[in-house]
Image: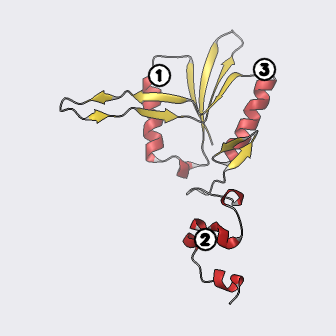
Amino acid sequence: MNKDDLLKYVSKDVLELNPELLGKKMEDRVTKNKFGAIKTEVDGITFDSKKEARRYQKLKMMEDRGEISKLVLQPKFELIPKFVTPWGEKVRTTTYTADFMYSVTDEYGITIDVVEDVKGGKATQTQVFKLKWKMLKYVYRDKPSYQFLIVA
């Protein structure tokens, strides 16, 4: 039995754990997440999806043209600080990591900080995402200079 015949009987899970059976290195494989998004590299940065990579390219062009400034990738926000319960249990910090953050100055000279998350559709807006997104808006509710944007 040759290698090709053998591969017919090997499960997909085994092939994923042993890519050398296909003669490919792990980094040469195209990986998809549970939503079907394909990791994509642009400017040496690996993005979780092609859509996120395209959005980065667009934001980068906007920054180069001076339409936006202070572009930050993967900004992290604290939603709940770490604490210790009255009975001594240590609870870790709860954070939210957005895809992008950047500043926009309007025609009146007012600067707005935009926090952006790229979503492929309703399926990628999980319950955890929705809850953390809501918490993020709650934490920054008294800061009118922040705008929260989902790019679908």
Q: Is residue 87 left or right of residue 78?
A: left
| Circle 3 Cα neighbour tier, 10 Å, few/some/many (<14 / 14–19 / ≥20) | few
For disc 3, the marked residue is: 66
Residue flagged by tag 2: what amino acid is it? Leu
What residue appears at the point 47 percent right and 22 percent down from the top-left corner? 140
Please name the residue that numbered disc 2 is placed on: 15
Q: Quadrant of the N terminus?
A: bottom right
Residue furthest out toward the bottom: 1
For the residues labelled 2 and 3, the Cα–Cα distance comes to 47 Å
Extreme residue toward the top, this view:
108
Mark 1 Cα within 10 Å, few/some/many (few <14, many 20+)?
some
Q: State the residue in front, 25 or 44.
A: 25
Which badge, 2 or 1, comes first in the chain's sequence? 2
Tell me which corner region of the image, top left, top right, bottom left or bottom right, holds residue 73: top right
Residue occupying the point 63% across, 53% down? 37
Say whether residue 61 is left or right of residue 122: right
- In the picture, the disc for residue 140 is 1
Residue at the extreme right: 65
- Return the x and y of residue 71 as percentages of the image width and height: 68, 26
Q: Quadrant of residue 26?
A: bottom right
Which of label 2 and label 1 is nearer to you? 2
Secondary structure at numbered mark 1: loop
Report the quarter where the C terminus lies: top right
- Who comes first in sequence, dot 2 or dot 3? 2
Count the labels in the image: 3
Nearer the viewer's eye, disc 2 or disc 3?
A: 2
